[in-house]
Amino acid sequence: MFFMLPIRTSIRPRKTPYANYGLIAVNVIIFILSYSEHINPFTGQPETLRPWAEQLLLTSSRPYLWQFISYAFLHANFTHILGNMFFLYLFGNNINDKLGNIGYLAFYLAGCIFSAIGHLLLGGGNVLGASGGVAAVTGAYLVLFPQTLITVFYWFIYFINTFEISALYFIGFKLIVWDNMLERSFHQVAYDAHLSGYAFGILSMVIMLATGLISVSNVDLWMMIRQWNRRRRYRDAVSGGYDPFTGRSVKKIRAKQLKKTPAQKKQMEKIELLRSEIATRITEKNLPAAADSYLKLIDIDSEQILPRQYLLDIANQLTSQNNHSEAAIAYEKFLSHYPKYEYIEQVQLMLGIIYARYLDNSESAVSHLSQAAQKLADPGQLKMCNDELEKLQNQGEF
């Protein structure tokens, strides 16, 4: 006997996931109202749905439009609804947090529709249950939080314990490949509806991340793909004879030109060492040392660019150390190279304040503060921004 069940994830939603709680409640209420074990007097077969709920099933012979949603709120028995609602709670709360209540509700219902379409196109029969929509939510979790850890309970003969595994591997292999492709042993399970739901959840989230409809984070699958592509391009650049250390536009060069002078080799070694030091210091949360290494790095090559979070952490640290000129340069680099950062207005606010209060650069200050004022949502930050702009305007320069 071998049994596995995910019981928790390593992240929690920042806000109460009202839409997900609402979906769970509606599913439970409809189950209570529609479930009734009885013998059909016409066929003599056991059934579990009340007569009025039969028309809400998705029928393969003649499906009605409403059935593409209504079927997802019906369940065949207690085990069916318990399993679906548990997985919806486990993975749906964080998706709700990411998409917002309206966006999450629209996404869930779309997942139900697309899983139903996939089920019918692949030749499935009558179907009911929320598992298609839950599969879409689980697929979305794989894309948005692939590096989070899932705690899995397992029972193997006499051994009972738990272990942790990344969501990418557990959902990708266990739930999608193993449960729905390799082990299709239960005749009453709509495997094709599950796979259609997973496909919809994964593809829709990748598209929304790629097009900027939802904000990209440092841990989502789209960022992992981009990082893989950058590493691939880096390897191609090095193998093609490029210099990856300058941060400038690269050109193809001949093999003879690859030879570096001793001074160039020494400089490259210093750059590599300093970048490694910065990464190590930030990992150790030693930001003063990381900022010191960064200043040495840009002294050697002013065009060096760090990863997004590293550069932002160092710019903030330089500000706290009152190294305002260096901090402003770092923030400017950040705005130039990472313009799609989800909190870009806060960087603009900080840079505008530095220019206004410490560097006597009113023109740049007004430019950055004006851009920040258009996007700031926090009332305190917006007031600070407007107050600073008002001071600059009262000076009579703008």
Image: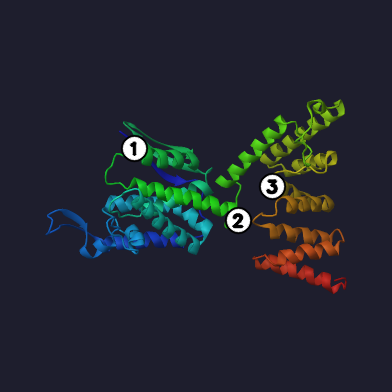
Real-space Cα separation, disc 1 to disc 2, in angstroms: 37 Å
Q: Which residue is mark 1?
A: 183
The answer to whether residue 355 shows anywhere in this view is yes
Q: Position of residue 166 (x, y in %)?
A: 50, 40
Judging depth in this view, the residue of 232 and 341 nearest the camera is: 232
Figure check: 1 above or below 7: above
Q: Which residue is mark 2?
A: 212
Left or right of 130? Residue 298 is: right
Figure check: 17 above or below 168: below
Real-space Cα separation, disc 3 to disc 1, in angstroms: 42 Å
Which of marks 1 and 3 precedes in the sequence?
A: 1
Q: Which residue is mark 3?
A: 308
Judging depth in this view, the residue of 276 and 267 nearest the camera is: 267
Q: Position of residue 34 (x, y in %)?
A: 25, 62
Q: Residue at x 83, y 43 (%)?
A: 302
Real-space Cα separation, disc 3 to disc 2, in angstroms: 17 Å
Identity, as a three-letter code, of the amino acid under mark 1: Glu
